[in-house]
Image (cartoon, helix red, strand yellow):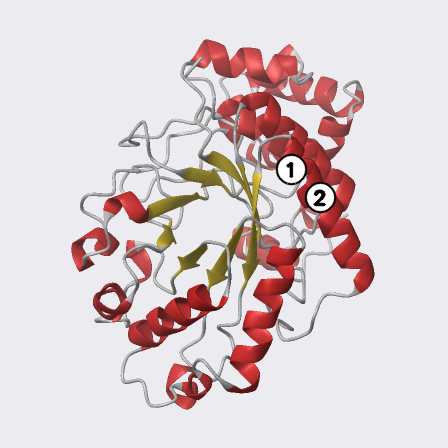
């Protein structure tokens, strides 16, 4: 087992799922057991975090958040509370006026309610900056200025997730990171994914952020290795193989929003070989039958390598393993995995020719059925 680092943690930062407070408490317990020390609250599905960021949290939410951060403190875990105003922030309102007042008030409220760090997220933005530039010639400079102003207005540390948080989204954003690095307080931490949004190689020396002048020691990796909000028909639970990761690199995992799965994935970050991976899955109640089909759920595509050729030499054996998993394995984790296991079973039936036209139409979404079989009006029973 690898040595656990306190600066590893969990990001609730995905689309499509929103945990409840008991879910979050369960994740805290797992982090504490594994010796991890960060929980980044930044769910895209919380309206007050992103789309309605100006709206204050109500009294009930604040009471629940205070209880959550209190439990985290008891366990030695820092809660980072994110705010994502970038969709419509008016940069003519820098350091004064309604937008900055709303942003700084929310940040202070979150800090008062127990957040140890505030995260300013300027990620996943459309190109509407010129209409809200407030006189800034460059978006990177505007984001740096906002981060600096907010950091000065609060009494807890602040980190920034920039618009360009991975090298594969730099197209059309010339100069963004240069302007950001030139204007940003060098003491502020910056959250990035690395060379790719879903990065296999976590070395940072050659990343655009470092080349622009952001100190590597200030970078925190947002790790999307197991994330599936961008591909919700898929599940990745293979070994956590991370090339180029420095032993002291700060990193947090942004996984799936399926709580039992995420507890397992956090544990996979602590093992460093295939035996440890298998043992971790078994400790979470995964039956041996899963390992007969595990290659289908291993890792996300590597951006620089072809996908491995996934074939089952004995499709009948794979289907038998899936039948055991689908019909005999009954746990909270199995219920999270059911759609993915069933999806693989259906894929095998289709690719082996065992599914007739009607079954294909039941299994496949209409567009895929039309594309794969070029027969949108197929009425064959």
Query: Which residue in the protein does label 2 denote?
Result: 68
Considering depth in this image, is 128 or 301 the residue closer to the camera? 128
Q: Is residue 169 left or right of residue 100?
A: left
Whether 47 is drawn above or below 304: the answer is below
Considering depth in this image, is 129 or 111 the residue closer to the camera? 111
Q: Which residue corresponds to the image point at 43% horizontal and 87% vertical from the top-left?
A: 132
Q: Secondary structure at mark 2?
A: helix
Whole-percent x, y for residue 288 in the image: 63, 11
Q: Which residue corresponds to the image point at 60% horizontal and 45% vertical from the top-left?
A: 233
Residue found farthest to the front? 155
Q: Is residue 137 left or right of residue 330?
A: left
Q: Which residue corresponds to the image point at 22% horizontal and 55% vertical from the top-left?
A: 208
Q: Secondary structure at mark 1?
A: helix
Q: How many marks?
A: 2
Q: Is residue 76 left or right of residue 21?
A: left
The quarter holding residue 75 reads: top right
Whether 240 is drawn above or below 110: the answer is above
Q: Which residue corresponds to the image point at 34% horizontal and 69% vertical from the top-left?
A: 144
Callouts 2 and 1 close, C-beta under 8 Å: yes
**Quarter placement of the N terminus:** top left
The quarter holding residue 309 reads: top left
Q: Mark on residue 72?
A: 1
Whole-percent x, y for residue 326 in the image: 74, 25
Q: Mark on residue 101?
A: none
Can residue 340 be spotted in the picture?
no
């Amino acid at each position: 087992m690898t040595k656990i680092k306190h600066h590893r943690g969990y990001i609730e930062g995905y689309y499509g799922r929103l945990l409840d407070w008991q879910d979050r408490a369960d994740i805290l317990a797992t982090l504490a057991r594994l010796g991890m020390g960060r929980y980044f609250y930044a769910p895209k599905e919380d309206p007050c975090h992103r789309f309605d960021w100006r709206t204050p949290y109500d009294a009930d939410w604040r009471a629940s958040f205070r209880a959550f951060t209190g439990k985290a403190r008891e366990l030695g875990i820092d809660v980072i509370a994110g705010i994502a105003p970038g969709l419509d922030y008016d940069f003519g309102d820098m350091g004064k006026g309604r937008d900055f007042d709303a942003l700084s008030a929310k940040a202070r409220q979150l800090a008062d309610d127990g957040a140890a760090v505030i995260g300013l997220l300027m990620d996943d933005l459309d190109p509407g900056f010129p209409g809200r530039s407030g006189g800034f010639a460059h978006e990177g400079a505007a984001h740096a200025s906002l981060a600096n102003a907010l950091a000065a207005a609060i009494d807890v540390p602040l980190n920034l997730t920039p618009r360009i948080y991975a090298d594969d989204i730099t197209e059309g954003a010339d100069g963004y990171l240069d302007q950001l690095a030139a204007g940003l307080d060098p003491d502020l931490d910056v959250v990035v994914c690395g060379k790719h949004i879903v990065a296999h190689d976590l070395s940072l020396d050659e990343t655009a952020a470092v080349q622009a002048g952001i100190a590597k020691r200030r970078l925190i990796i947002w790790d999307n290795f197991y994330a599936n909000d961008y591909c919700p028909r898929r599940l990745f639970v293979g070994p956590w193989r991370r090339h180029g990761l420095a032993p002291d690199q700060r990193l947090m995992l942004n996984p799936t929003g399926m709580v039992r799965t995420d507890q397992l994935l956090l544990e996979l970050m602590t093992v460093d070989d295939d035996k440890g991976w298998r043992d971790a899955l078994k400790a979470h109640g995964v039956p041996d039958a899963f390992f007969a089909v595990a290659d289908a759920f291993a890792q996300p595509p590597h951006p620089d390598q072809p996908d491995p050729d996934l074939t089952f030499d004995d499709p009948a054996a794979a289907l038998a393993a899936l039948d055991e998993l689908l019909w005999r394995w009954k746990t909270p984790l199995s219920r999270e995995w059911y759609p993915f296991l069933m999806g693989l079973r259906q894929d095998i039936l289709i690719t082996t020719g065992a599914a007739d036209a009607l079954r294909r139409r039941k299994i496949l979404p209409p567009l895929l059925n039309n594309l794969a079989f070029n027969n949108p009006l197929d009425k064959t029973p």
